Amino acid sequence: AQSVAQPEDQVNVAEGNPLTVKCTYSVSGNPYLFWYVQYPNRGLQFLLKYITGDNLVKGSYGFEAEFNKSQTSFHLKKPSALVSDSALYFCAVLSSGGSYIPTFGRGTSLIVHP
Amino acid sequence: EPEVTQTPSHQVTQMGQEVILRCVPISNHLYFYWYRQILGQKVEFLVSFYNNEISEKSEIFDDQFSVERPDGSNFTLKIRSTKLEDSAMYFCATTDGGGAQPQHFGDGTRLSIL
């Protein structure tokens, strides 16, 4: 079985400050990890993924995420938040040795204040 | 950039009626998925479809649901006899390969059951 936890329903940050959106996961086997962003009335949009290799993954719009195997985490980060980053963020996981159907977290609402 | 297109954007239906939600995948994509999202919350997997047959389905995807690709272009989700709890956003997603390929989502159909 695979699962994802996003412990924060909402994250508030001031524009220009660094942001972190947390994600922890549980899989049997090696994880494939993804972050997606959802703007109002839109579908999910792929940001970045970790498959193997370097633990720090860079993605779209200046976002990056760090894979930490010992803590089973894949936190999303950005050095300097923009108001336009305000959206719903979803972490997803699937197991390299299992079904290729991702399990999504419950989502974290990011609010960036001007 | 190619997009997944879903129609209609909003469907209002009386309980007990049949609905068909339509999706036009990205042209070279081979794997198709339906998800639902209730009130902007967790994204729930319904079904995956490859090579003209269902690959996997969740517990949500019961006998009231069906999928098909009637004309080699559209990918449809049919709900035979809708219930109030079927009210949700329904998203189609596609990939050009299985495994670790990111999914491309349409903007969804908002289904409201009265």
Image (cartoon, coloured by chain):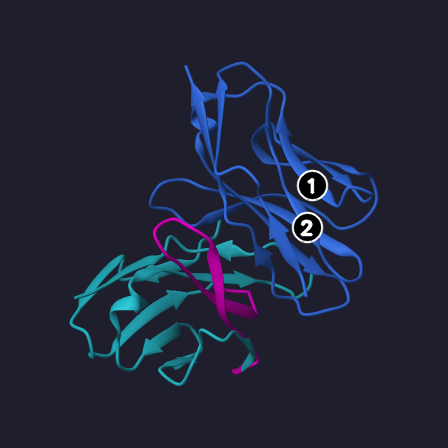
Chain colours: A blue, B cyan
Please identify the quadrant where the C terminus of chain B is shown: bottom left
Where residue B10 sits: x, y (%)? Answer: 24, 58
Residue at the front extreme?
Answer: A7
Of all chains, the one bearing label 1 is A
- Can you identify the residue that label 1 sits on? A74
Binning the other alpha carbons within 10 Å of mark 2 as few (below 14), some (14 to 19) or many (20 upward) gives many
Residue at 35% over, 41% down: A40
Q: Is residue B26 above or below residue A7?
A: below
| Residue A36 picture quarter | top right
The answer to whether residue B101 is seen in the rendering is no
**Where does residue A35 sit, x and y in percent of width and height?**
59, 44
Image position of B60 (left or right of B57): left
Q: Quadrant of residue B38?
A: bottom left
Q: Is residue A36 magenta?
A: no
- Is any atom of residue B62 visible in this view? yes
Gap in Å between the C-alphas at discs 2 and 1?
8 Å
The range drawn in magenta is: B26-53
